[in-house]
Image (cartoon, rainbow, N blue to C red):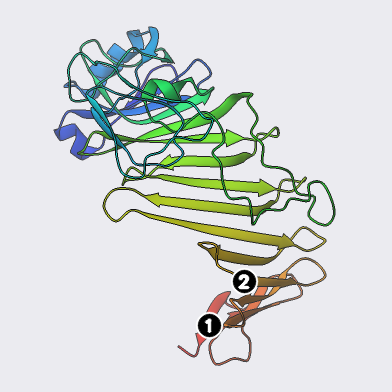
Amino acid sequence: MTFGTAKYLAEDATQRNLNQWINTQFDDLNRTVLVGQMNYQASRQDLQQTVTSLSTTGTISPLLPADLTISVPDQQGDVVATDAIDMGDGFSTLMNGTFSASIVPSGSGGGGYPSGSLPVTLNPVPTGATVLPLIINYYDNYDWVAATGSGLGTNLATFNSGGFVTGYNTSPEYAVQVVSNPIVRGQVTGTMHLVLAENRPLYSVNFYDDRYRPIQNRTINYTGGVDTLTTQYDFSGKSLRSLLSHYKAGTGAQYHTVLTKMDYDPSFRISHIWKNIDGASTDQLISSQQYNEIGQLTSKELGNSLDNLNYDYNIRGWLNSINRGLYFQYQLDSRALLWIATGL
């Protein structure tokens, strides 16, 4: 491992044989902005001397795809590619929204890097070496969305709020409305992960409320569709509802949703979890929890009475047994501090 000023290059035995290094780059607040792969032939000692002498501050560039196919409904924002953009089956724009598609030449074809936009301080990359970005983190704003051509949009995506709590700031849930906060300085607004061997970036964008709690994440999945996770909180920050929308693009396109509902007891311990798949007429109970007077979990019911887990504790508060007296049980031998399983 080779260090700069809070920057480093690392390699394992396999990478050493291939003259490869994992390169981590930071901004001026010491936040990780890039993790990439660098090809450079040098010993660790020589590279350490080189990195120590570097003190440049510059930029790193977003990775753009060469060809981009968009098959996502309610598209908004800007998308960019270096060669071609195709609007495939399932593509539509958001009503009253704005959308644009642009070709930005990279100078090399086959995808590439346009003008840089992410500041890097004390860049530990030797002269002549190139870095393939594997992970990029974006902070403070959503300017990167248009620059990368991800097409994820810079506003909260519409979602089916039918299962969400609409009685805001009232008993018993004291739910908070799902509204994004435009001031996101200091927050991770998005990430890029590169699909190895395909040189294809997958982007995700994060939105926050006015307490900087993540209320929505949109991620491009492997098929080119978008997975959206939207979360509703109560006043104290506990999750009340979460809606996962999954869109599989391409051949055999599919769209599915999973709604999760949670409630809590007066001591703010989770009591029940329900799931609803694809807007079914009834919710399915997943688990129910019961607690004793000092807050220890005493019983957990799985599904709608499908199975039960009962917990016993000793006077010290240690977990003493699970399903005591049943055919299959775990019991703690306090003398040897060993778990004894019976019924196996």
Location of residue 80 (image quadrant): top left
* Residue 229: % across, % down: 53, 47
Mark pair 2, 1: CA separation: 26 Å
Relative depth, front residue between 59 and 83: 83
Q: How many marks?
A: 2
Q: Which mark is first along the chain, 1 or 2?
A: 2
Q: Where 276 falls versus 2 (above or below)?
A: below
Is the residue marked by circle 1 packed among few (<14), some (14-19), or many (20+) residues within 10 Å?
Answer: few
Q: Residue 270's x, y, as percent?
A: 70, 62
Q: Can residue 76 be seen in the rendering of this structure?
A: yes
Q: Could you tell me residue 41's position as x and y percent? A: 16, 22
Q: Please indicate whether residue 134 sits to the left or right of residue 261 in the image.
A: left
What residue is disc 2 on? 287
Residue at the (82%, 61%) spot, across then down = 266
Amino acid on which disc 1 is placed: Ile
Residue closest to the eye, 320 or 218: 218
In front: 172, or 16?
172
Residue positioned 80% across, 50% down in the render? 174
The amino acid type, in three-letter code, at marker 2 is Ser
Circle 2 crowding by C-alpha within 10 Å: few under 14, some 14–19, many from 20: many
- Residue 106, compared with residue 245, is above or below; it is above
Residue 334 in view, yes or no = no
Query: Where does label 1 land, which residue?
Result: 340
Q: Nearer the viewer, mark 2 or mark 1?
A: 2
Q: Quadrant of residue 125?
A: top left
